[in-house]
Amino acid sequence: MERMPKWADVMLTPLISLILAFAISALVILAIGESPAEALKVMVEGALGSSYGWGFTLYYTTNFIFTGLAVMVAYHAGLFNIGGEGQAAIGGLGVALVLLALPWPHWALALPAAAVGAALFGALWALIPAWLQARRGSHIVITTIMFNFIAAALLNYVLVNLLRPVGSMDPASASFPASTHLPKLSEMALGFGIEWGRNTPANVTFFVAVAACLLVWLLIWRTRLGYEIRAFGKSEPAALYAGISPVRITVSAMLISGGLAGLMAINNVMGEAERLMLNAVEGAGFIGIAVALMGRNHPFGVFLAALLFGFLYQGGGELALWTTIPRELIVVIQALVILFTGALDNMVRMPLERLFKALRRKGA
Amino acid sequence: DPALIFDLGGKFDKSFNEAAYNGAERWKAETGGSYKELEMQSEAQREQALRRLAQSGANPIVMTGFAFGEVLDKIALDYPDTKFVIIDMVVEQPNVQSVVFTEEQGSYLAGVAAAKASKSGTVGFIGGMDIPLIHKFECGYAQGFKAANPQGKVIINYTGTTPAAWNDPVKGSELLRAQVSQGADVVYAAAGGTGIGVLQAAADAGVLSIGVDSNQNHLHPGKVLTSMVKGVDNSVYEAFKAGADVEPGVRIMDLISGGVSLAMDDNNKPLISDEIAAAIDAATKGIESGEIKVHDYMTDNSCPV
Amino acid sequence: MAAAAGAPAIELRGISKAFGPVQANKGIDLIVQRGTIHGIVGENGAGKSTLMSILYGFYRPDAGEILIGGKPVTIADSQTAIRAGIGMVFQHFKLVQNFTVLENVILGAEDGGLLRPSLARARGELRRLASEYGLQVDPDALVEDLSVGHQQRVEILKALYRQADILILDEPTGVLTPPEADHLFRILRGLRDEGKTIVLITHKLREIMEITDNVSVMRRGEMAATVRTAVTTPAQLAEVMVGRKVLLRVEKPPAQPGAKVLEIRGLRMIDASGIQRLHGIDLEIRAGEILGIAGVAGNGQTQLLEILGGFPEAGAKLEGEIRLNAKPLPLDGAGADGRARRRAGIGHVPEDRQTEGLIMDFSAWENMAFGYHHAAEFRNGVLMDHAAIRADAEGKIARFDIRPPDPDLPAKSFSGGNQQKIVVAREVERNPDLLLIGQPTRGVDIGAIEFIHKRIVALRDAGKAVLLVSVELDEILALSDRIAVMFDGRIMGERLSEEATTADLGCLMAGVDPVATARDAAHWPAVMPDPESGGSAG
Amino acid sequence: MDFATALQILDSAIRLMTPLLMACLAGLYSERAGVFDIGLEGKMLMAAFTSASVAYATGSAWLGLLAGIAGSGAMAGLHGLASISFRGNQLISGVAINFLASGLTVLLGQRIFGLGGRTPSLSGAARFNEITLPFADSLRPVPVIGRIYADLISGHTILVYVAFAMVPLTWWVLYRTRFGLRLRAVGENPASVDTAGISVTRLRFAAVMICGVLCGVAGAYLATGISAGFVKEMTAGRGFIALAALIFAKWRPWSALGATFLFGLLEAVANRFPNLDLGVVTVPSMFMNALPYILTVIILAGFVGRAIPPRAGGEPYVKER
Ligand SMILES: Nc1ncnc2c1ncn2[C@@H]1O[C@H](COP(=O)(O)OP(=O)(O)OP(=O)(O)O)[C@@H](O)[C@H]1O
Ligand SMILES: Nc1ncnc2c1ncn2[C@@H]1O[C@H](COP(=O)(O)OP(=O)(O)OP(=O)(O)O)[C@@H](O)[C@H]1O
Ligand SMILES: [Mg+2]
Ligand SMILES: [Mg+2]
């Protein structure tokens, strides 16, 4: 029935696109007078060549999974949530408040509480745009953009004036108590007697992210709410016909979306920095847009895309750290990957389809 | 080999990262030595960068920015044979030298100069991102200005609340114009790349500006009153020169030690009248002798003026 | 009729076209004589629209030759087709909804870079065409404010404005009321008599018999036959089309009305823009009875169905009383949404299957649970029971002979008729106490019509109540036990179907009640009928 | 607030709104033709860089402007290729363009000038300087009107006047020309354009390229008009604000003028009153900085109804299902 085998569509197309993106990146590297082979080696080795590299790659991946899922869930409801950045930042505030307010005896207790705090704050930050969209028709794209700016201002105020320990220059909260520090993946591996990724930030949150992928998959494709979200996203009149309330779906989808974005904070704020800093999100909210769209709005795709971006981030970081290649090159490589695998994918797919058609004709 | 790690703003931030870079380059040019430099991409890399450098045997490792404080405090003891130098932050570990600058003193002098150079009695301050460190500049400046002109007025603006605030010359120039229209005729910019726009707009509008961190007088000769220079370059230079023998402990780079100063060169010579020079001199002496106490915003998060 | 001097207007030779795996046209030959009206019939998905789109340059054929007026032409795009004198009115109109009529007419046929002269010329031209062919339409009205009938006129005007010699109409009457259709046919005859050639695609054999000179039957992508209309019969055509004998009449035993299922009293509605759409509707339907609502589209039928179905337009104000099985139904609030209505026992086949009844991107099986996705048998704890939903869908696909019988295919991949069957299967098989059904056979081929009609009657015979809304008077007359006619948000009158005549209903549809008028004339000659009580007459 | 202050704030608002207005109109052409564009930011940034570089190299602001248009145009071409020719996802393409511009500008800038992505400062003819309109000085003494003319209307760079002139021009093109009619049609229902025998691809490409040109002007204004050179990331989110303004304006030219003016005004007010002293409390500067955004949300929620985008927006045109 299909124009080309499914495996080719799912595997071959992205692979060729990726190769194209890297080929163009190589040209850019050549153009700035550096060696592409060297750069590739540093990136791959730095990100995937050792448990150390993986420890970072998985840390970034975890961030991107959350923001990617956030964009994805909203997208299924036909809502374009550009506010992941702000929601994740406010999620960090939730984590900080939870962890600083109470004396947590053990991380296993602190983690669920902080996760609730993060999700709750992130969700709240998404609630206002959602409500305005559902009730007042204010376009969610504008309101979420605005809420990113407002979140930055709010966080700045809170950190500088309320949470900052006196005498500290750093607009950051106090460090969280040691009892709330999350186990790093390296420590967990050590528990099994394996020396893996020492001193890397990847932590137990990675498993939370993987679980979130599964749960979001269940939510979207196995629950009634997910069914309603998808239906509403495809056709509002049909949703009304079926008795699906637009207000309820808009608000629920955005709450879940904001909650997921907020959850990122347990990785970067609780798991890595162990205190709340200004600009802790570092653009992961925007990367989430690319991750969701490239992952074809499917949790598994989001996982893979997040891994790809984790690799790019870590590999690129290595590049910036250990070579003379400026770190902006990584941004360019990211851009090319997004462009080729996400927007120009048909450029690869169309000739492939023709190729498969020709092959089939020959075979038949 | 020594090593230098830049903060997230990157080595060409028109601010203290760039000054650190210049210090390292000077050392390189003078000694012919080589050094490692690192630019980070994200917060999570701080620890990674420090550890990897320490493991690679770099010594001393110099880093710019208060944001390294936490991480350094945590890992310094893992590498007892390595010396670390941190700029703009105090980390109390036996193998760490902390270099802090009394920006409030330098800014105080800038305030005095501004007061004397101002004809309208109104001056401006434009900060980059709204964070305590920049308030420290603002507060010193305001104190110096008020000391020289108790009736005068300081208009204060911050560019924004996100890192974008460091790179928005358009907004910088607009803020300057807003201040000029309120009567300001000398404006002090502590705003990284945004400051470029402030200085430019000031030159266009025919008012004086004061640069920050490194000597920016040359950017618009005859139009930049002076620059509040923070000797980050010297600190890096000296640390590199001392090599593994860097003295641990806190180094306070103040007016006396020449850590902060006002830049005087041919570019601003015509602007510095004798009266201004005398006032700056007097204030310098006062601070050095302890007669004038410049309040540090960081000690209590507030500014007396 | 114009003398068939020389070559035929259109000659197609061996046209083939595939969409991916679907072979929509297979080696089609067709000759259309100049100055005739040529009908094309065929089941849903037979390839009629595809063939005509190729002729119009919208699609390119994979193989084959096209001759216009005897000369071979390569129709690479619509521009070429337009230059060759071909105009086409698509099944789904290609109008810009928020443009005025005038703007739509000149789009692509402007005289120069500036609009003003083009608009001025078009205005004059439209006036001329309007008087010449009776194609009246306000040139400054926004298309989205026009009724479908008027939108269609705009499409025809577009073609005529481009001086089309050959006019292709794809299912033009699917959305028209009978008077509108009659009007259209008068126009078409006029055009033919002027020497223009017309190709007419339709599912209504009555129309074929009434207006065409020749008719071609398509079947599964192939041209099955072309005959002179005068020498064929509807039954013959239907048999060629479907490949079996088709019952063109609905067979139904007499109704046996039982208890009152639905009772509506004084239902009023004012929409968000403040226009009163319903002026006090009173209706009742009993178990085992089909109530047909006839009326020209836009007289409140849609609003009535939407209110009963639980999704009136946002911001509407409602008033009145609705009882189902003697229990009052709330008019608004949480208890008045589609879900609550289903729970109360109301099934609903909406008028617009593509935007309301189906999620076009969902698979057939997912669509089969649409609206009932909360049902107990479809759930498995907090999750949906996909196995159960699929099994249920497969059963419905088999029982309703939905083709292709692949539950995984997205709804958009089914033909219109099969899409409609998915919706009908979903709603009918729930055995609702009351089935609301709007335009059940719009755009559906005769095979499917026969089937859908049978199922509606079967539901009635199982003792359920059916509220049928259709602009097809034939359909209303064939299916209903009682007929109510709506006009301007009111029930103009009610008739038992065996008593109803087309003429009588036509009068009511036009807002005139012959009986009431006569009665009023007898009793209160000088008094105007009270608008509020006028609906309950009969 | 006195008259002079009001004039100054309005004057500042005009300068601040100019890049927003240009970018907003740019987006208007593209989105009205059915191609969504969240890459306004990237295109402006690229244009700011190329215009500053070329203006520096040649000493001519006009050549800089051309280079800005070329730089932004290249990005627009990429967007067109991805979202029109290859029917890719328009949002992804926009995101990619933002990243690309952000990285490339610094990379190239560093390679060429070695200033860490900054270009050298521009001066003299390499910048667009403020022009004084005729009679500005002689009319200044006329009460109110004279001041408005001399201080508010006169004294901007040529690009500001270009931006304002673009509003009626855009309106005229959109509603009075054949091109505009077709452009609006292709954004509402591309099939209507296609069946009328007009190429959807060509039309959409034209719109996307106009968008590129206008973003180019906006970027050139940032780097060679209002400031004197390029600084990395100097667009600082203005592309997103322009996008917000576009939606706010419901994709209409005159409303775009209003929406961008509102943003400019709010920012100018916040600049002018960095700490609002309300007697009891002083509003901290962080909130004054966020005020334009907060007010936007409030205005949007309170006074502006549902914004309905062009109906075919965001969807690639595919004839064969
Ligand atoms: N653009 C398209 N892409 C893919 N398949 C198509 C396309 N258009 C039509 N088809 C398929 O081609 C076949 C013929 O479709 P077509 O629309 O020509 O049928 P039709 O005879 O006009 O049917 P109907 O009576 O429902 O209008 C169908 O199977 C249809 O699904
Ligand atoms: N036993 C049944 N037979 C037929 N239809 C049913 C049955 N149970 C439920 N439904 C249908 O499912 C729909 C909703 O069912 P139900 O009332 O059980 O949902 P609910 O319990 O209110 O929802 P929730 O899932 O939120 O608990 C109704 O439209 C109803 O028609
Ligand atoms: Mg058809
Ligand atoms: Mg059909």
Image: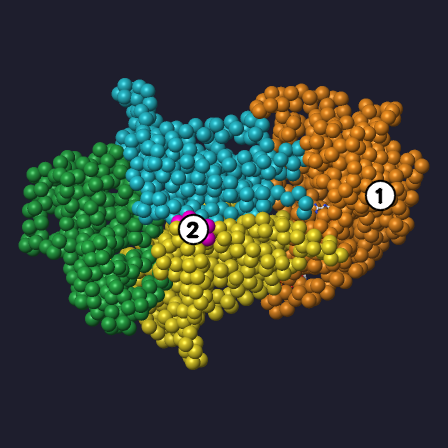
Chain colours: A yellow, B green, C orange, D cyan
Percent of width and height locating residue C258: 81, 56
Q: Is A62 on the left-hand or right-hand side of A15?
A: left
Residue C51, picture quadrant: top right
Residue of label 2: A30
Task: Please state which amino acid type lies under the numbered disc 2.
Answer: Leu
The residue carrying pointer 1 sits among few (fewer than 14), some (14 to 19) or many (20 or more) residues within 10 Å by Cα, namely: many
Above or below residue A86? Residue D301 is above
Percent of width and height locating residue C462: 82, 58
Q: Which of the pair A339/B245 is nearer the observer?
A: B245
In the rendered view of the protein, which quadrant contains the N terminus of chain B?
Answer: bottom left
Percent of width and height locating residue C141: 63, 29
Looking at the rendering, the stretch of residues picked out in magenta corresponds to A26-32
Residue of label 1: C223
Residue A60, picture quadrant: bottom left
Residue C167, picture quadrant: top right
Total number of numbered discs in the rendering: 2
- Seen at 44% across and 39% down, the residue is D71
Q: Is C217 on the left-hand or right-hand side of A245?
A: right
- On what subunit does the disc labeled 2 rest? A
Whether residue C378 is visible: yes
Residue A246: assigned label:
none
- Seen at 46% across and 50% down, the residue is A27
Q: Which of the pair C311/A264 is nearer the observer?
A: A264
Whether residue C442 is visible: no
CB at disc 1 and ligand 1 closer than 8 Å: no
Q: Residue furthest right?
A: C231
